Image (tube, coloured by chain):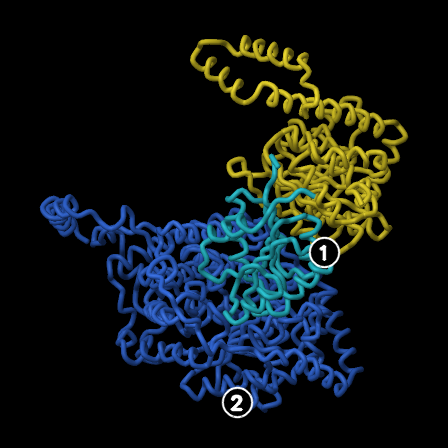
């Protein structure tokens, strides 16, 4: 039986293996992904982001436990940063989700960022598809809300929860740039702590400044660890999904995503083609020249582009 | 030091440096570029009075038995009474452990120290699914009062002091101890001993927690309150740095994190309205003893001085007993090597010596085979004999605080106190120990030290004899202790039998009363006592509390 | 496999709370370029095996100091066989007496590392004993 069929039957091992293939060797994973695509599109994808220590994993865990009670099947993608020096990573989000480990209707996968920008959102998107095709109703993507690559990744979602906690100090300022705009629901976690109301006021002010004319996103208080506010949070998510479906937002987001996906895949292919047709050595040679002031980068690119075009016209087709 | 004295030393030192030292250094370089203590503190070539310029004998040391207790908590120390030799023991079931206790008492041990198995420490009965494979392994299995009756049979509780390494369910085991005293006809006021009862270090270093921090702290203050009225001789907590050090901390971190936890307990109790000078004298501590002799001795002295200051200045304690840091010591399990295990006897001797020179009140010496398995009877005897040789042959017990006045030791003592104080200030800024633990700060600090230690060994910056140098081929060690695999079955049978014999209605009534009281603000001790008297199981009692308090989950990332 | 990483599950089965070794190993493996999944204390054999499968790890590293290894390790191997996942390399560490080591190797644990083991030795062992395979 081929991998795609096994995935659709919910074979955990097959799903896990295909995800590995996506991460390790995307080109080879594409065959199975092509087969699976027609079975995708049913799952709702929820992004959960926020600063380190805000309790994203706990919220993910508690939300999952909550919706398991109403029979929803859940997939979770937990993303942690890889070390830029060694490429290694400690993937520790699962530590808060291990009560779910033996639930056959929950599939959790931890992934490292592995250091290249386009690659991560490409794999994440593929993993979402695999989980969707295996029959998950809800897929959570959990990642730290700092840095460009994380924002890219979280945009794979249909709706986005932004988790914050009181007492972060200046961190809220750091969040503001880029990430405050993408939150559909704000979760103020650890809301039993001092400063929760102050944080809510701050968020309200910031939303107000940002979203002119846009509807203000709801703010939900939770204490994840004690399961407080989780049911309400889920209700809000459900309500919002209906709303976004009705006003065409979800469609629009998915449309943007597919467009981006096609373009990103094309870009990745193009990059691969560049290295296959032109080669690392040619690139290095140009680098040297520019460094020695024998050439400038603009002319170097023109030269490489010419070479590239020529190769393609020569029939460099069955590459990639 | 007066001005002229200082000048003279400086002059002589300068001459020594130019006439002798530098010439020697030119010809023969030293073994290493930098020398560090066991905890990576840089060590100078030598120490002299110039290092102790701001040192004040009366303020910094004073006399033993007096504030700040640097030299010890009693005026005569071991000239009056030797430390309590207390070997931590327990394995299998109550019958077997009772035999080991009898053996140790006959061999001159002066106090008991009970090791419980992990299901007991985590509040599970031996029949709980999570207990599979763990029953009787690292200590004795206790399910009901009946097991405790067997454990202490033939041991009159008014004649021994008993230390119990029990934390999350400490209230339950203490209640059982009280109940068997009642059966032996001994008054509660006569009971002498310690429960570890230190939950904060479980979250950072030892892992046998049950409930979340807040209700756990409430159980602890309930015990403080109950004991201050009913068990005046009982040590209600043993605030433990031992496991923090085992988890990989440095000496400074051991002191800092332990005292920070101590501050949290004292704050919780005073907030509850308890009088500091009533409960504080019953607080005790538990530290680790490592191989770096001077650093360890300095650590114990620094801890005493720092705690005295904290109690006096921060908490305004009045009773001198509230300011005295009394402590138990155990030699460092993590320094024992599986390679050439007989060498461990020597390590343990050095560590035990450090504890005695540091003025410990009681001491456990590890056995040479503990990196391989539970200790055999023979190894335990050597460990006990090690203490006896220090006590009776080495001469170090014949005068009080014999290392005091060493330039190196006093400098180290001050530095360790300062380093620990810096950490405590940092923890205060984070909102105190419980908050620092919740944020993972303390865990992270310990992990970083543990990782560095490992890397230092692998890079041979730190030499461990028999491990990364001086290795030799060796025969595998024989006669290791094996816990009888039948224990789990036997324990289950005992449990089922007592469940049939007990008055079920009474048990259920007591359990539901406990649940009610746990949900209120009342002290849980009397209700727990009723439960154990009626032979409710440890698991049943803890389950009531779990329902009210919830359970804590390990959630701190690496 | 241009972008492959060795994936390791570092797990603490049973009730033992001593996690110094497990955490040191986790960091050492990370520093050797591996992706390490750490799941915390008190894991059941079922949780460990299910996690290993979902995470598609190449290696499971188990650590026990409580003496419960003769029950928990074989149980984990049994479950792995049931799930047809015996291709995962299983190694272990902790306080394991010599005479138990032979028996544990018989049930499929590839290597047992006792206290004092150099982490580089573990990294080397993993690299030599796994094969990052395609599906």
Which residue is under mark 2?
A: B156
Q: Tell which chain the image draws in blue.
A: B
Q: Chain of mark 1?
A: C
Side (left or right) of A16 relative to B344: right
Rendering coords of residue B540 (x, y %): 72, 74
- The mark total stands at 2
Q: Residue at x 28, y 59 (%)?
A: B409
Q: Residue furthest right?
A: A246
Circles 2 and 1 in contact, beta carbons < 8 Å = no
For residue B465, side relative to residue A281 (left or right) = left
Are the residues under badges 2 and 1 in a single subunit?
A: no
**Viewer-nearest residue: B26 or B12:** B26
Q: Nearer the viewer, mark 2 or mark 1?
A: 1
- The residue at the point 44 percent across, 89 percent down is B106
Q: Which residue is mark 1?
A: C84
Local SS, label 2: loop
Query: As rendered, which of C89 and B221 lies closer to the eye?
Result: C89
Q: Colour of chain A?
A: yellow
Residue A54 place in picture, x, y as percent: 65, 43
Does any portion of residue A141 appear in the rendered image?
yes
Q: Is residue B324 visible?
A: no
Left of B305 or right of it: where is C106?
Answer: right
Q: What letter labels the chain drawn in cyan?
A: C
Q: Is residue C74 placed above or below A173 in the rendered structure?
A: below
């Amino acid at each position: 039986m081929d991998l795609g069929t096994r995935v659709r039957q919910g074979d955990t091992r097959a799903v896990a293996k295909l995800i590995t293939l996506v991460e390790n060797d995307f080109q080879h994973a594409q065959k199975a992904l092509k087969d699976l695509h027609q079975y995708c599109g049913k799952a709702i994808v929820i992004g959960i982001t926020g600063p380190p220590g805000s309790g994203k994993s706990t919220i993910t865990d508690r939300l999952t436990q909550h919706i398991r009670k109403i029979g929803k099947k859940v997939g979770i993608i937990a993303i942690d940063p890889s070390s830029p020096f060694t490429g290694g990573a400690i993937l520790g989000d699962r530590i808060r989700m291990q009560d779910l480990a033996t639930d056959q209707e929950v599939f959790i996968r931890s992934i490292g960022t592995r250091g290249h920008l386009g690659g991560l959102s490409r794999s994440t998107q593929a993993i979402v598809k695999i989980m969707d095709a295996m029959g998950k109703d809800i897929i959570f993507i959990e990642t730290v809300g700092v840095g460009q690559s994380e924002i890219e990744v979280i945009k794979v979602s249909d709706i986005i929860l932004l988790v914050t906690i009181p007492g972060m100090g200046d961190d809220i300022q750091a969040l503001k740039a880029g990430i405050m705009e993408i939150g559909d629901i704000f979760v103020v976690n650890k809301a039993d702590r001092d400063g929760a109301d102050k944080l809510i006021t701050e968020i309200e002010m910031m939303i107000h400044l940002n979203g002119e004319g846009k509807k203000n996103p709801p703010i939900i208080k939770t204490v994840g660890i004690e399961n407080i506010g989780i049911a309400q949070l889920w209700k809000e998510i459900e309500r919002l999904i209906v709303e976004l479906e009705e006003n065409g937002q979800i469609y629009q987001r998915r449309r943007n995503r597919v467009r981006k996906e096609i373009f990103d895949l094309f870009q990745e292919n193009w990059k691969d083609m560049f290295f296959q047709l032109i080669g690392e050595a040619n690139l290095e040679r140009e680098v040297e020249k520019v460094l020695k002031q024998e050439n400038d980068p603009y002319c170097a690119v023109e030269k490489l582009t010419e070479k590239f075009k020529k190769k393609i016209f020569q029939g460099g087709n069955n590459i990639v | 030091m007066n001005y002229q004295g200082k000048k003279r030393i400086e002059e002589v030192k300068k001459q020594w440096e130019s006439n002798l030292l530098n010439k020697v250094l030119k010809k023969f370089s030293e073994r290493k570029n930098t020398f560090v203590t066991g905890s990576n503190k840089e060590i100078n070539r030598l120490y002299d009075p110039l290092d102790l310029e701001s040192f004040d004998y009366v303020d910094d040391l004073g006399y033993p038995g007096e504030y700040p207790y640097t030299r010890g908590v009693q005026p005569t120390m071991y000239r009056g009474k030797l430390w309590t030799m207390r070997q931590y023991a327990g394995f299998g079931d109550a019958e077997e452990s009772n035999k080991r206790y009898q053996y140790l008492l006959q061999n001159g041990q002066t106090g008991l120290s009970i090791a419980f198995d992990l299901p007991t420490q985590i509040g599970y009965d031996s029949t709980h699914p999570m207990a599979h494979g763990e029953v009787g392994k690292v200590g004795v299995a206790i399910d009901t009062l009946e097991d405790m009756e067997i454990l202490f049979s033939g041991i009159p509780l008014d004649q021994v002091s008993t230390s119990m390494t029990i934390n999350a369910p400490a209230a339950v085991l203490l209640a059982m101890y009280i109940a068997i005293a009642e059966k032996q006809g001994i008054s509660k006021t006569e009971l002498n001993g310690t429960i570890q009862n230190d939950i904060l270090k479980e979250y950072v270093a030892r892992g046998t927690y049950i409930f979340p921090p807040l209700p756990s702290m409430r159980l602890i203050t309930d015990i403080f309150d109950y004991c201050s009225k009913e068990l005046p001789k009982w040590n209600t907590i043993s605030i433990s740095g031992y496991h923090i050090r085992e988890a990989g901390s440095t000496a400074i971190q051991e002191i800092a994190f332990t005292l920070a936890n101590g501050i949290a307990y004292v704050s919780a109790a005073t907030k509850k309205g308890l009088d500091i000078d009533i409960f504080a004298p019953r607080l005790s501590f538990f530290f680790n003893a490592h191989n770096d002799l001077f650093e360890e001795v300095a650590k114990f002295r620094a801890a005493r001085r720092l705690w005295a200051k904290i109690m006096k200045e921060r908490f305004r304690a009045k009773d001198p007993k509230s300011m005295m840091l009394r402590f138990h010591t155990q030699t460092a399990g993590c320094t024992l090597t599986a390679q050439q295990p007989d060498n461990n006897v020597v390590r343990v001797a050095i560590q035990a010596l450090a504890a005695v020179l540091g003025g410990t009140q009681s001491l456990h010496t590890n056995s040479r085979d503990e990196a391989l398995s539970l200790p055999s009877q023979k190894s335990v005897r050597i460990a006990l004999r090690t203490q006896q040789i220090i006590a009776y042959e080495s001469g170090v017990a014949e005068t009080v605080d014999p290392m005091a006045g060493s330039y190196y030791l006093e400098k180290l003592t001050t530095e360790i106190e300062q380093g620990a104080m810096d950490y405590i200030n940092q923890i205060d800024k984070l909102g105190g120990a419980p908050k620092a633990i919740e944020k993972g700060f303390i865990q992270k600090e310990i992990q970083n030290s543990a990782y560095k230690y490992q890397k230092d060994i692998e890079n041979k910056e730190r030499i461990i004899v028999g491990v990364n140098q001086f290795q030799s081929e060796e025969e595998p060690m024989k006669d290791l202790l094996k816990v009888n695999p039948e224990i789990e079955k036997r324990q289950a049978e005992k449990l089922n039998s007592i469940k049939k014999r007990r008055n079920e209605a009474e048990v259920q009534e007591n359990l539901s009363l406990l649940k009610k009281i746990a949900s209120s603000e009342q002290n849980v001790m009397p209700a727990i006592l009723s439960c154990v008297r009626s032979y409710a199981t440890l698991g049943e009692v803890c389950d009531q509390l779990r329902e009210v308090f919830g359970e804590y989950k390990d959630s701190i990332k690496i | 496999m241009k972008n492959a990483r060795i994936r390791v599950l570092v797990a603490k089965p049973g009730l033992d709370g001593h996690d110094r070794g497990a955490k040191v190993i986790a960091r050492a493996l990370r520093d050797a370029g591996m992706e390490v999944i750490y799941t915390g204390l008190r894991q059941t054999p079922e949780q460990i095996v299910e996690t290993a499968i979902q995470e598609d790890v190449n290696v499971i590293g188990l650590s026990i100091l409580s003496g419960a290894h003769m029950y928990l390790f074989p149980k984990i191997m049994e479950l792995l066989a049931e799930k047809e996942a015996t291709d995962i390399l299983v190694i272990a560490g902790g306080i394991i007496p010599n005479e138990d080591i032979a028996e544990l190797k018989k049930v499929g644990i590839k290597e047992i590392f006792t206290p004092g083991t150099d982490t580089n030795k573990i990294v080397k062992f993993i690299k030599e004993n796994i094969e990052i395979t395609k599906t």
